[in-house]
Image (cartoon, rainbow, N blue to C red):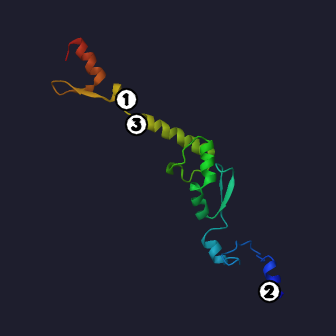
Amino acid sequence: DMEKDDEARPIYTPLNLPLGWDGKPIPFWLYKLHGLGIEYKCEICGNYSYWGRRAFERHFSEWRHAFGMRCLKIPNTSHFKEITKIEDAITLYDKLKKDAEEQTFRPDQDVECEDIQGNVMSQRAFEDLRRQGLV
């Protein structure tokens, strides 16, 4: 009967230490080592709190964060690791979209032509000179 009473009673943890695999509080040094006293909040996840760096880093690939990013219409890629504020994520996504637009190939501006003398110019300039009969 005494053993059953011990198991039924909740374990007393004066420091609010999390329970380990054996159902007993983890040692305080391990608690400090893993930084489990440090709270990380993620605005994208609905201000959900993550305790410890490891849990925080792992949450970026979990469903709650992916759902928050999908609601913002932002892909959950590696560019957005460590981004927890909605405003920061939107700003970064807009910058990435703008950079991608600048990187895309535009035939009217990016095609270069070379005349007989070896001068390199845009296709537009080359066509203008050819129409004028200068090339």
Mark 2 nearby-residue class (10 Å; few <14, some 14–19, many ≥20): few
Residue mark closest to the camera, 2 vs 1: 2
Say left or right for 38 vs 125.
right
Mark 1 nearby-residue class (10 Å; few <14, some 14–19, many ≥20): few
Say left or right for 133 vs 35.
left
Report the residue marked by disc 2: 3
Of mark 2 and mark 1, the one earlier in the sequence is 2
Residue mark closest to the camera, 2 vs 3: 2
Report the residue marked by disc 1: 106
Residue 90, given in percent of the width and then of the height, sits at: 58, 41
Q: Amino acid at mark 1?
A: Arg
**Residue placed furthest toward the top:** 132
User: Relative to 107, is 59 above or below?
Assistant: below
Residue 10, given in percent of the width and then of the height, sits at: 79, 76
Determine which of the numbered discs, if any, sits on residue 84 in the image. Answer: none
Give the SS element for disc 2: helix
Report the residue marked by disc 3: 103
Seen at 19% across and 24% down, the residue is 115
As measured in the structure, the alpha-carbon distance from the residue carrying label 2 to the one carrying label 3 is: 70 Å
Q: Amino acid at mark 2?
A: Glu
